[in-house]
Amino acid sequence: MANNTADTTDTAPGPAPDAAVSALVAAVQTFTATMSGDVPFGAAGTVLERLRAVREQIDQLTFAMLAPLAQMEASGALLAEGGQNTLKAYLAHAWGIGHTEAERLMVLAQNLHRQSLPETAAAIEAGALTVGEAAAIAAGVEREVGKRDPGTEPDADLYRATLDRGLAGMKAD
């Protein structure tokens, strides 16, 4: 997924959001307003479908944010601008998530940035994997790459690609 912030980024100083963030805020406010009150009798199926659709969009937003965050971590901008020296620390602090989830998202983000899990990235884009499932795959792949026997699997990148293809493909089927 290409990261094109040039079209929507407001470079003026201050906290004002750009057009894309403003549109997202408006959409969230509209959706939130429609979810207030009780679920009408007989509408549970429709409500559940709407919630599933919104969750898919949240996953796409999360996915879109991960590679740029890893890029900023790699360049040092995350420390300079975000005040955190690791992506895990930034995610835990800025997103308010637990350290275990932050670590799994960090591993996924770093792999997305390095483009080392192309099958997993494609499965997220296609909607075959959630970000959570992809983060579990990324963490598992990195764990297995770290535990591999270099005598039988000397090429870490090839081993990573094989695991990525197998795990992402298994989930997509």
Image (cartoon, grey):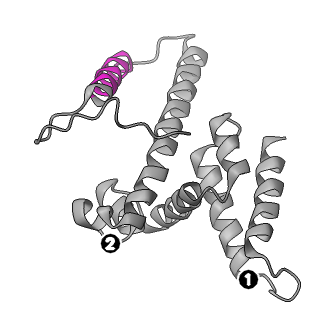
Q: Considering only vertical position in the picture, is 58 above or below 114?
A: above
Percent x, y of residue 29: 29, 22
For the question of whether residue 27 can be seen, the reply is: yes
Disc assigned to residue 147: 1
Q: Label 2 amino acid?
A: Asn
* Image mark count: 2
Q: Name the side, left or right, on which 122 lies relative to 54.
A: right
Q: Considering only vertical position in the picture, is 166 above or below 8?
A: below
Query: In the structure shown, which secondary structural element does the residue marked by tag 2 occupy?
Result: loop
Residue 121 shown in magenta: no
Percent x, y of residue 68: 43, 51
Q: Marks 1 and 2, Cα distance to the nearest angstrom?
A: 26 Å
Percent x, y of residue 115: 62, 55
- Residue depicted at 84% across the width and 80% down the height: 153
Tag 2 or tag 1, which sits nearer the N-term?
A: 2
Residue projecting furthest to the right:
152
Q: Residues within 10 Å of mark 2 (few under 14, many from 20)?
A: some
- Residue depicted at 46% across the width and 37% down the height: 61
- Residue depicted at 47% across the width and 11% down the height: 40
- Which sits in the foreground, 19 or 49? 19
From the image, state whether disc 1 or disc 2 is nearer to you.
2
Residue 35 shown in magenta: yes
Quarter holding residue 81:
bottom left
Q: Considering only vertical position in the picture, is 38 above or below 133?
A: above
Q: Name the side, left or right, on which 102 lies relative to 9.
A: right
- Which sits in the foreground, 46 or 132? 132
Percent x, y of residue 16: 15, 34
Main SS, magenta region, reads helix
Q: Label 1 amino acid?
A: Lys
Q: Which residues are magenta?
A: 22-37
Q: Which residue is mark 2?
A: 85
